[in-house]
Image (tube, rainbow, N blue to C red):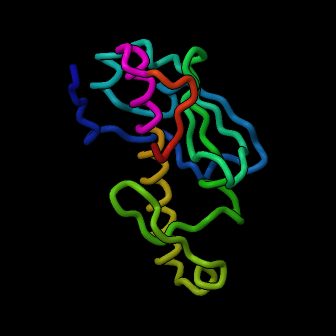
Amino acid sequence: MVFTIDDTDAKLNINVEDIGFNDTKTMSLEQLLSHNDLFKDYPQLKKYKVEFKHLGLDTAMGVYTAGTNTITMNLDYFNGENRPRIKEVKDGNVTRYYTKEEFNNLSEEEKQKESETTQRFFASVVLHEVQHAVQEIEGNFSDVYASMGE
């Protein structure tokens, strides 16, 4: 059985850029995400852990690990001065990044827009990983380790 929970009113309770780049941080999914419909249907998700770690740019942006009920978000993509700067997102995937030179030449308004794009994309990665958690709860999740881009 496949059904959908509307994410229209879902919102992050943090700005990913406010997490200290050198920090490894853990919080509950309920602390990170406001999503009444999701937590009403799957109250156990409130207590799932969300970890923010540096995993490198050669790995996933987000990972759901079945069995430990943990979502790990890769700070290297979303936080810090040297993170990739998102230029374009299409169909839920980053299709283009700014070069350092391009980004440095942007106006403050354009840099703010890039920051907002990063926040929205971060939220979409979190929701993607939550989808894997729901699949596990529903018995439709066969991979122990699921990552963005599947």
Residue at (57%, 14%) from the top-left corner?
A: 67
- Give the total number of marks visible in the rendering: 0
Q: Viewer-proximal residue, 67 or 71?
A: 67
Which residues are the magenta region?
Answer: 127-141
**Does the magenta segment cover residue 139?**
yes
For residue 109: magenta? no
Q: Is residue 7 above or below residue 58?
A: above
Which quadrant of the structure image shows residue 66? top right
Please name the residue shown 65% across and 38% down the image.
Answer: 52
Q: Residue at x 53, y 78 (%)?
A: 108
Relative height, residue 30 to residue 122 (above, below): above
- The residue shown at (38%, 22%) is 135
129 to the left or right of 101: left
Q: Is residue 130 above or below residue 116?
A: above
Q: In what quadrant of the picture does the N terminus appear? A: top left
Q: Position of residue 122 (x, y in %)?
A: 49, 49
Say if 118 sits above or below 44 in the image.
Answer: below
Residue 87, image x, y percentages? 48, 72
Residue reaching furthest to the front? 142
* Main secondary structure found in the magenta portion: helix
Left or right: 138 as drawn, with respect to 133: left
